[in-house]
Image: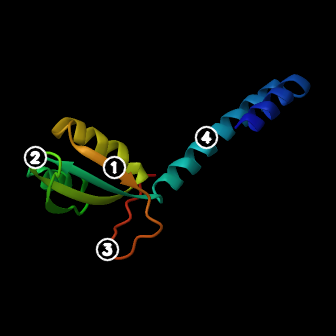
């Protein structure tokens, strides 16, 4: 991006200003499209632990993704909680975080990037 800015500034000073502006707009637009297309192909495994027992079904319906849940026990507190796992693309992560803030802002969430995902993972195109 810094190199593109340098080239556009150089072109604006030494060449035609209008062409430099069009080049800058094209660089920004193409960067946005490539980023958007790439983000939907990056998968993330999201684990979250919550005290709310129905949150897995809520996230399942809201996101349209399968959620696997199981009961866990916190060793420090001794409390029973639900652990959930969902695989989504990076494009969907923002929506997931908003849903979690709405339903259970105290949930413990961690994200991992799997090297590969096999099986029934439905690709959702966001572009």
Label 1, label 2: how far apart the Cα atoms are: 17 Å
Q: Earlier in the sequence, mark 3 or mark 1?
A: 1
Viewed as shown, does residue 26 lie left or right of 41? right
At 87% from the left and 23% from the top, the residue drawn is 13
Disc 3 target residue: 120
Disc 1 target residue: 110
Label 4, label 3: how far apart the Cα atoms are: 33 Å
Disc 4 target residue: 29
Relative to 124, does residue 34 appear above or below in the rendering? above
Q: Earlier in the sequence, mark 4 or mark 1?
A: 4
Q: Earlier in the sequence, mark 1 or mark 2?
A: 2
**Considering the numbered disc 3 on the image, is that residue within a helix, a strand or a loop?**
loop
Relative to 30, does residue 119 appear above or below in the rendering? below
Evaluate if marks 2 and 3 touch, with contact meaning CB atoms under 8 Å apart.
no
Q: Nearer the viewer, mark 4 or mark 1?
A: 1
Q: Earlier in the sequence, mark 2 or mark 3?
A: 2
Q: Nearer the viewer, residue 48 or 2?
A: 48
At 47% from the left and 60% from the top, the residue drawn is 41
């Amino acid at each position: 991006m810094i190199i593109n800015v340098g080239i556009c500034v150089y072109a604006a000073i030494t060449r035609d200003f209008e062409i430099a502006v069009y080049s800058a707009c094209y660089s920004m637009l193409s960067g946005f499209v490539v980023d958007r297309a790439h983000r939907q192909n990056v998968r993330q495994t999201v684990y979250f632990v919550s005290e709310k027992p129905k949150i897995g079904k809520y996230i399942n319906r809201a996101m349209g993704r399968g959620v696997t849940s199981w009961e866990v026990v916190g060793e420090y507190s001794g409390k029973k909680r639900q652990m959930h796992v969902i695989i989504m693309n990076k494009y969907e992560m923002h929506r997931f975080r908003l849903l979690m803030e709405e339903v259970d802002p105290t949930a413990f969430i961690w994200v991992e990037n799997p090297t590969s995902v096999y099986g029934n993972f439905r690709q959702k195109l966001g572009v």
